[in-house]
């Protein structure tokens, strides 16, 4: 599950747990973006702070893990590069016993983000390296399977659609609440709330937008 996580919030965690349970996934790997190509420089918080917040948020769930792969990699954080690298790391970790224990990667996306997939860098590489789990997002229609057939013919079976959860929380709203001096209790894990306060994050509106942004 990738994203800027600026900050990570309860919606991210609820979606991850739903995908894990519904699709019977072994674990969820959170991948904070290092340099998201769709967001101009200076509009995203320091990657190390975002990493720490994600790490704090998932600490109490043994099925959740976190990766620095995009933070430590130079250049823009393209998802195609990430899923291929994770798949290659899995192949390199096999013990040579001949047992077919290949790990299959599932990329979790919101319905909003999924609709933008054709505009991403080499999306076919993503679908070849990973399956997709598409979760609903408030204010956005459910994906049309016919659209998928047209956009990525022959890859329809690579996508699974989840029914929920539908959590109306966004990182943009959380940042704006902090800038306004409003409470974010119950919108983010308690450890994340404490970290934001201790490090004086999101105290100004300089990085906020008047238009609601994706919650990643």
Image: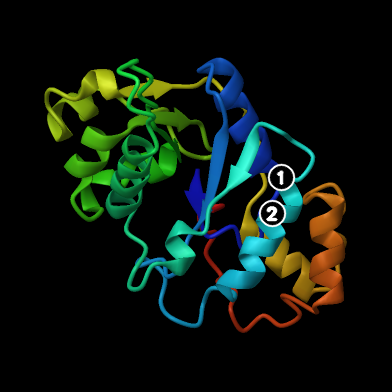
Q: Is residue 83 visible?
A: yes
Q: How is the image coloured?
A: rainbow
User: Relative to 147, does residue 138 appear above or below in the rendering?
Assistant: below
Left or right: 164 in relation to 178: left
Q: Nearer the viewer, residue 61 or 91?
A: 91
Residue pictured at 63% horizontal, 52% vertical: 170
Q: Which residue is mark 1?
A: 58
Residue pictured at 60% horizontal, 34% vertical: 15
Total numbered labels: 2
User: Relative to 156, does residue 75 appear above or below in the rendering?
Assistant: below
What label does residue 55 carry, if any? Answer: 2
Q: Nearer the viewer, residue 23 or 90?
A: 90
Residue pictured at 37% horizontal, 31% vertical: 94
Q: Secondary structure at mark 1?
A: helix
- x and y percent of residue 162 in the render? 49, 21
What label does residue 20 carry, if any? Answer: none
Left or right: 49 in relation to 35: right
Left or right: 125 in relation to 46: left
Crowding around mark 1 (Cα neighbors within 10 Å: few <14, some 14 to 19, many 20+) is: many
Left or right: 166 in relation to 158: right
- x and y percent of residue 25 in the render? 52, 22
Q: Is residue 166 visible?
A: no
Quadrant for residue 40, please give it.
bottom left
Dots 1, 2 in contact, CB < 8 A: yes
Marks 1 and 2, how far apart at CA:
6 Å
Crowding around mark 2 (Cα neighbors within 10 Å: few <14, some 14 to 19, many 20+) is: many
- x and y percent of residue 96 in the render? 32, 27
Q: Secondary structure at mark 2?
A: helix
Quadrant for residue 173, please give it.
bottom right
- x and y percent of residue 71 in the render? 48, 66
């Amino acid at each position: 599950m990738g994203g800027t996580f600026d900050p990570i919030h309860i919606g991210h965690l609820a979606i991850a747990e739903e995908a894990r349970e519904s699709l019977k996934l072994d674990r969820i790997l959170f991948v904070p973006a290092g340099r998201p190509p769709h967001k101009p420089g200076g509009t995203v918080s320091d990657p190390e702070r975002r990493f720490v917040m994600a790490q704090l948020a998932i600490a109490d769930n043994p099925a959740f893990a976190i990766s620095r792969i995009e933070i430590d990699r130079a250049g823009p954080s393209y998802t195609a590069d990430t899923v291929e690298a994770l798949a290659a790391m899995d192949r390199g970790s096999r013990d040579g016993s001949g047992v077919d224990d290949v790990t299959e990667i599932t990329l979790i996306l919101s319905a909003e983000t999924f609709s933008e997939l054709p505009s991403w860098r080499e999306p076919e590489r993503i679908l070849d390296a990973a399956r997709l789990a598409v979760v609903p997002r408030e204010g956005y229609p459910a994906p049309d399977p016919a659209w998928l057939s047209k956009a990525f013919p022959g890859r329809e079976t690579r996508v699974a659609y989840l029914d929920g959860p539908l959590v109306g929380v966004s990182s943009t709203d959380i940042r704006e609440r902090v800038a306004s001096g409003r409470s974010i209790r119950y919108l983010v894990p308690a450890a994340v709330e404490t970290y934001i306060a201790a490090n004086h994050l999101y105290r100004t509106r300089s990085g906020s937008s008047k238009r609601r942004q994706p919650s990643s």
